[in-house]
Amino acid sequence: MGLKLQKGLLHLVLMAIGFVMLMPFLWMLSTSLKFPNEIFTYPPTWIPSKIRWDNYFDAFTAVPFGRYYANSLVVALSVTFIVLISSSLAAYAFSRLKFPGREMLFVIYLATLMIPFPVLLIPNFLIVREFGWYDTYAALILPPAFSAIATFLYRQAFRGIPKELDEAARIDGASSWRIWWNVIMPNAVPVTAALAIFTFLGNWNEFLWPLVVTHSQEMRTIPIGLNSFQGQYSVK
């Protein structure tokens, strides 16, 4: 009986904490359905006196949010896919293939993590402009599509996979490409999933780089579009 009571109290506490965490989202939803003169009334009201669904229509017609969402989705998915492929291939070479200067090259590659992004911002922008990529998907996708930290994490994961699996596959006639795809990658699903989530979220929320390399409405992503929308309509 005492154990059931403890579990019941624990569930009540967790439900209360969950409700507190949901309150900002519920308030946001409530505010989005109010008339402008009701938003700043005091005391505040949780339930709108009259629901105004036109707020969503006005927002989506004032600026092309659909285009912003599509751009963010294309950029985030493309960068995530390229990062996973390029980083896993590089990590496979650093962990499985033997070639002169492998360890030194890996240290140099890893040392790029110590260079802060603001230092690289202007050189990267000049390269993008020189290639004619300014205000294109190439500028949004290619520069962040190669990750030293992803290569490091993949390399550490690959080193934990027994080399006997590689040797058995090679005896059966598998090439290095086949071993990477059919032996190594299936055993690295956890690190792949983690990197996919973090890479996707990082590029979905990226603000500074898209702000620098785009200027047209058609190429803006969600963070840039929201910032522009707030700047235009926050005082109205």
Image: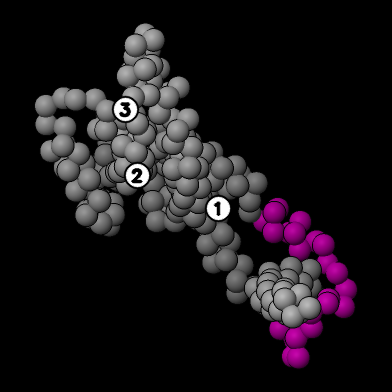
State the image coordinates of residue 18 (x, y, percent, origin top left).
Answer: 68, 72
Q: Is residue 57 visible?
A: yes
Q: How is the image coloured?
A: one colour
Residue under label 1: 222
Q: Amino acid at mark 2?
A: Leu
CA distance separating discs 2 and 1? 29 Å
Identified at 46% across, 40% down, the residue is: 192
Front position in the image: 88 or 80? 88
Image quadrant occupied by the N terminus: bottom right
Q: Amino acid at mark 3?
A: Lys
Question: In the image, is residue 236 above or below residue 76?
Answer: below
Mark before the other along the chain sequence, 2 or 1: 2
Residue under label 3: 163
Q: Which residues are magenta?
A: 38-62
Q: Amino acid at mark 1?
A: Ile
Classed neighbour count for the residue bearing mark 2: other residues with Cα under 10 Å, few (<14), some (14–19), many (≥20): some
Front position in the image: 138 or 27? 27
Secondary structure type for disc 1: helix
State the image coordinates of residue 129 (x, y, percent, origin top left).
Answer: 31, 39
Q: Left or right? Give the position of 184 relative to 221.
A: left
Question: In the image, is residue 98 above or below residue 103?
Answer: above
Residue under label 2: 153
The stretch drawn in magenta includes residue 26: no
User: Which of the 4 image quarters holds residue 116?
Assistant: bottom left
Secondary structure type for disc 2: helix
Secondary structure type for disc 3: helix
